[in-house]
Amino acid sequence: SQQGEEDPQALSIQEGENATMNCSYKTSINNLQWYRQNSGRGLVHLILIRSNEREKHSGRLRVTLDTSKKSSSLLITASRAADTASYFCATVRNFGNEKLTFGTGTRLTIIP
Amino acid sequence: GAGVSQTPSNKVTEKGKYVELRCDPISGHTALYWYRQSLGQGPEFLIYFQGTGAADDSGLPNDRFFAVRPEGSVSTLKIQRTERGDSAVYLCASSFKGQLTDTQYFGPGTRLTVL
């Protein structure tokens, strides 16, 4: 079953603008990860944020995590046409194994 | 190759047939995961292997689904008596040790279509 939802379901912006996607989840977590998927196939790991972290940066990506609200956001700055893809958040719980529980995804389209 | 590979990339079968999907993980990765992704949805966990053993098969939908990893590297997902609802993209991922913060590396997936 899906862990939670992402918002918005779809987002279209002009190249160069910033894109923000939000993710909500339901249970306590060890960490939250963001993945990108092109053309409905392979997923690429973007960034991981641990439950005791509030913000993390990687290149043009900025991720925030609010465990009290069970939510996270992904900001992509200075978007490029190549950023067009679906973006998924995924959570890992504090016990058991590292299986990922994915959200429903945001379809991002960058307009050149 | 350096990444996770999956074969075949596409599989079309008829309702009731048996199919096998193969995953070659990154060399040296002990943890291997299978996920299933239906159209417009996020991937859903099926099964997790640590070495040769299935450490967590809680995501397998029913007993028509089975997976093996006999030598701790290549894994095969087996689906018996396929149904139209089994149509999806089946994704495989591997990670170094399966620790909670290990990165999972995904293969390109196998698109299964059951007619």
Image: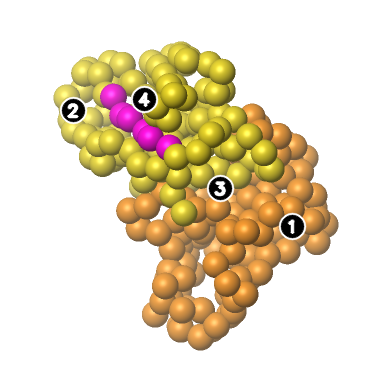
Residue B73 in view in this figure: no
Q: Quadrant of residue A72?
A: top left
Residue at label 1? Answer: B54
Q: What type is the residue that disc 4 sits on?
A: Ser
Q: Chain of mark 3?
A: B
Q: Chain of mark 4?
A: A
Of circles 3 and 1, the one toward us is 1
- Asked if residue A24 is among those painted magenta in the image, a careful observer would answer yes
- Quarter of the image with the C terminus of chain A in it: top left
Compared with A19, B70 (above or below) is below
Chain letter, colour yellow: A
The CA span between labels 4 and 2 is 17 Å
Q: Would you say A103 lies left or right of B99 here? A: left
Label 1 SS: strand
| Disc 4 with disc 1 on a shared chain | no
| Disc 2 with disc 1 on a shared chain | no
Toward the front, the furthest residue is A68
Q: What type is the residue that disc 3 sits on?
A: Gly
Label 4 SS: strand
Residue at label 4? Answer: A73
Residue at label 2? Answer: A13
